[in-house]
Image (spheres, rainbow, N blue to C red):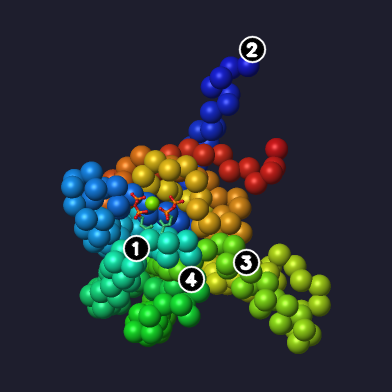
C-alpha cells in the first residue's frame, strides 16, 4: 500500500507567502446567539476584527486582502439585520478613513452597488478616491457581491465591448477585464471561518486556482495569530497548477 504520508501536501519548505488573501468572514450571528446576544452584536464585533486583520496584513507580507462582507443572498435576512449591517459598513468607512489613509491602505469595493443606499454609495466612492494613491495594502470589500451576478454583469460588459468592435475574439483575460476585480491579482488563498465548508458564491472565477482553508473559529474570534498560523500552513503547500 502507498505510504499515506505521500498524500499529504508536500513540505516544499519555500515558506511562500500568499500575496492575495480572501476571507469569507462567517459566524458573526452564531457568535452572538451563543452568548445570548442579538446577531448585530456579532456583526459589530466582527467589524472590530476587520480593523485588526487589516492592520496585521502588511507586516505578514500580505499585500492584497479581499473580504466578503455582504452577499447578493444576504438580502433574505430581516430588515433589521440588513439595515444594521449597512450602518456598520457606513460607520466603518467614516471612522477608519483617516487611519486607512495614514496606514497606506487602498480601499475598493466589488459587487453591485446600485441597490445600496445612496449615502453608503457616496461613502464608498469617496474612500476609493481618497485612498487611490495608497499601495501598502490593497483592501477590497465585497458588498452586495455574488459571483454569479458578477459573471452575468461581466458578460453584458463584454458583449457591449464586442458590439463596439473593441474586442474580436474574447479571451479569458478579456473576460477578467470585465469583472468587478479587473486589474486585481487572483486570490492565492481563500479562508472561511465558522466551520462551514462551502464557497457561497464568492469569487468563483478569480479563485479557480486558489488554496482553501476552512477553520471552525467564528469570525469575531479570529485573530491575527489565527491568520499567522494559516499563512504558515500555506507556506508548506505545493501549488502545482496542473504541472507534474
Ligand atoms: C457573516 O456572519 C456575516 C454576514 C454574512 C453578513 P453570519 O451573519 O452569516 O453568521 P452566522 O453564519 O449566522 O453565524
Ligand atoms: C457568506 O456567508 C457571505 C458572507 C460572509 C458575507 P453566509 O452566512 O451568507 O453563507 P451561507 O448562507 O452559510 O452559505
Ligand atoms: Mg453565515
84 lies left or right of 172: left
x, y percentage for residue 79?
33, 68
Residue annotated with mark 1: 78
Q: Earlier in the sequence, mark 2 or mark 1?
A: 2
Whether tag 2 and tag 1 are in contact, CB under 8 A, the answer is: no
Q: Earlier in the sequence, mark 4 or mark 3?
A: 4
156 and 59: which is toward the camera: 156
Pair 4/1: label in front: 1
The residues tagged by marks 2 and 1 sit, at their Cα atoms, a distance apart of 54 Å
Residue 110 marker: 4
Instruction: Decide: is 135 above or below 226.
Output: below
Occupied quadrant, residue 144: bottom left
The residues tagged by marks 4 and 1 sit, at their Cα atoms, a distance apart of 23 Å
Whether tag 1 and tag 3 are in contact, CB under 8 A, the answer is: no
- Which residue shows up at 35% across the image and 58% down it? 57
Q: Residues within 10 Å of mark 1 (few under 14, many from 20)?
A: few
Instruction: Decide: is 33 above or below 143.
Output: above
92 lies left or right of 159: left
The residues tagged by marks 2 and 3 sit, at their Cα atoms, a distance apart of 44 Å
Occupied quadrant, residue 119: bottom left
Q: Residues within 10 Å of mark 2 (few under 14, many from 20)?
A: few
Q: Secondary structure at mark 2?
A: loop
120 lies left or right of 210: left
Residue annotated with mark 2: 1
The residues tagged by marks 4 and 3 sit, at their Cα atoms, a distance apart of 12 Å
x, y percentage for residue 39?
26, 56
Amino acid at each position: 500500500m502507498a505510504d499515506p504520508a505521500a498524500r499529504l501536501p508536500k513540505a516544499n519548505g519555500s515558506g511562500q507567502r500568499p500575496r492575495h488573501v480572501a476571507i469569507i468572514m462567517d459566524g458573526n450571528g452564531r457568535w452572538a446567539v451563543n452568548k445570548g446576544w442579538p446577531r448585530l452584536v456579532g456583526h459589530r464585533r466582527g467589524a472590530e476584527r476587520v480593523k485588526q486583520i487589516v492592520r496585521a496584513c502588511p507586516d505578514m507580507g500580505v499585500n492584497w486582502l479581499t473580504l466578503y462582507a455582504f452577499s447578493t443572498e444576504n438580502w433574505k435576512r430581516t430588515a433589521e439585520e440588513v439595515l444594521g449591517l449597512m450602518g456598520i459598513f457606513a460607520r466603518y468607512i467614516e471612522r477608519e478613513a483617516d487611519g486607512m489613509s495614514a496606514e497606506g491602505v487602498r480601499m475598493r469595493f466589488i459587487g453591485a452597488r446600485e441597490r445600496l443606499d445612496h449615502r453608503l454609495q457616496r461613502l464608498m466612492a469617496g474612500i476609493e478616491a481618497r485612498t487611490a494613491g495608497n499601495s501598502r495594502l490593497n483592501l477590497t470589500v465585497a458588498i452586495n457581491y455574488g459571483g454569479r451576478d458578477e459573471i452575468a454583469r461581466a458578460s453584458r460588459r463584454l458583449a457591449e465591448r464586442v458590439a463596439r468592435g473593441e474586442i474580436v475574439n474574447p479571451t479569458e483575460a478579456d473576460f477578467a477585464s470585465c469583472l468587478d476585480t479587473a486589474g486585481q491579482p487572483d486570490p492565492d488563498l481563500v479562508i472561511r471561518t465558522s466551520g462551514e465548508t462551502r464557497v457561497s458564491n464568492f469569487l468563483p472565477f478569480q479563485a479557480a486556482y486558489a488554496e482553501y482553508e476552512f477553520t471552525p473559529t467564528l469570525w469575531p474570534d479570529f485573530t491575527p495569530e489565527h491568520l499567522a498560523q494559516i499563512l504558515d500552513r500555506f507556506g508548506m503547500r505545493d501549488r502545482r497548477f496542473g504541472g507534474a
